[in-house]
Amino acid sequence: MDLSTLTYIFVGGSFALYFGIAIWAKAGSTGEFYAAGRGVHPVANGMATAADWMSAASFLSMAGLIAFTGYDASIFLMGWTGGYVLLALLLAPYLRKFGKFTVPEFVGDRFYSTTARVVAVGCLIVASVTYVIGQVKGIGVAFGRFLEVSYEMGLLIGMITVAFYAVLGGMKGVTYTQIAQYCVLICAYTVPAVFISLNLTGSPLPQIGLFANTVADGTPMLTKLNQVVMDLGFSEYTALKGGTVNMIFYTFSLMIGTAGLPHVIIRFFTVPKVRDARASAGWALVFIALLYTTAPAVGAMARLNLMNAIQVGEIGSPEGNLVYDERPQWFKNWEATGLLKFEDKNGDGRIQYYDDKNKEFAAKAAEWGWKGNEMVKVDRDIMVLANPEVAQLPNWVIALVAAGGLAAALSTAAGLLLAISSAISHDLLKSTFKPDISEKQELMWARVSMIGAIVVAGYFGLNPPGFAAQTVALAFGLAASSIFPVLMMGIFSKKMNNTGAVAGMLAGIISTLLYIFAYKGFFFISGTELLANTPANHLFGISPEAFGTVGAIINFTVAFIFMKMSAPVPAEIEAMVEDIRIPKGAGAAQDH
């Protein structure tokens, strides 16, 4: 059966499953819309959390970054997994014990302040919308390729799909849809990895194949990859290329940003008991590890396959380059999306793919008549989806990967949109500005606000500020600088008052936004950067994606300064904090 037919079968079948679940699990109350009625089993919640967590950045972009940046990209593995452990141990059980629906609701009640709640909503929306942009990029990439439409049309189709099952089912529908999506995405990620590992190294386990010898000549796979990329002027794959300080700050920003992400935190509000929150966190870590331990092998093998596909002869020689007119079908397929572009700069009809920024190799290439790197665009987000095609795997495997990529992007987008809509309808309208609205009206506004969030995310997704993982890293920095500190202080500091919490959140997120805008500009308006976004120009070598750590330090510092200058915490709030930290009881949700 041809690839297009199989793709429509796999993708269409998975979508039919998602839509069916959404109709079956339609939310009929705010409790079901916000927290799935608090009746989700820990194992099921762990699986849903894993799907919510493993976004397009994890499925599509992380391996792509590993493929092109090598060792440096390990910061994503360390930061995201370490952060999830931090969340499971330090925040999730206590927030579930508090028994509320949303993160801003906890902030508002803990800091006895409507202002604190509104500021928390603002921080949540800024971080979540930035995160959604990364998911939208993944949706556009996946839909564009496998429905054979433009990136823009793929993005539109994907957003309409998310709108259907997220708006209809709320947290209840999203939870059970994400369970199905996890099953699809983990199969789609691991099955082709097994095939490719067998082809390259003879090992069925990609985690072992990464360090095994290649089948072709018995060279260790990573040694082979280093040789291939260095022969074309690229940096050694396994070497540390970024600054150590930036790497530490970047990793820590991802860690604490993970622990402050509202769409992950609210997943722990859906289980019946505090003990179940801990159990579901453990199960989620197991489910996440299945993909995260496979990602380094997928990235390395994808890079090797790509280099071998374009360099069909001796690596680094003029005669070794692929003739453009003889390019394989996968190349043509991705060219049609606009995410892979070739420009014949010297008119010889061959594809010169090398690092023309490497002065030594560029001089050698000039002697051969090369005019520069002719692969003018290789979008890193295509690597996981293109890898099975490049490796010439069976069509059903390629179709499975398409379904998995879409499942990953859709699952996290739905969770983020739900967090945004809950904050707007429950925390801004019901709890702040329109407390007299009925439950039915609140549910209506939750759905309306979700549709609005989808429109905004789709608009920004047309002009993302970078690859999916880079965009997501900015969101993690925003969460790290604003939400994580206030949650930590709210749980573990009985003395932190409302003035300190509000001042800290504002200082953290404003400083981080200013740093991002200075180096990356307002990404929806081109040409607004104030400073050149190069490592040499970054403050102390800290990139915008890593600045969340600095923002968090600013948040904590400002919060404690303002705390000392203002009225102390009421005794009943101190007692409430003490009660939260006692790990027993479930706490009952309060609809107010």
Image (cartoon, helix red, strand yellow):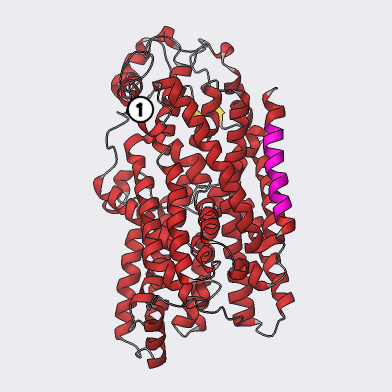
State the image quarter where residue 373 is shown.
top left
What residue range appears in magenta? 7-21
177 left or right of 210 in image:
right
Residue at image x 40%, y 66%? 484
Q: Please name whichever residue, 132 or 212, is drawn nearer the observer in this view of the structure.
A: 212
115 left or right of 141 in image:
left
Query: Is residue 577 in view from this perspective?
Result: yes
- Quarter that holds the N terminus: top right
Q: Please name whichever residue, 317 or 145, is drawn nearer the observer in this view of the structure.
A: 145
State the image quarter where residue 417 is shown.
bottom right
Instruction: Residue 528 in the image: state x and y as whole percent.
Output: 48, 51
Instruction: Residue 4 in the image: state x and y as whole percent.
Output: 70, 27
- In the image, is residue 76 part of the stretch drawn in magenta? no
Residue at image x 25%, y 50%? 245
Residue where numbered disc 1 is placed: 357
**In the image, what residue type sits under mark 1?**
Lys
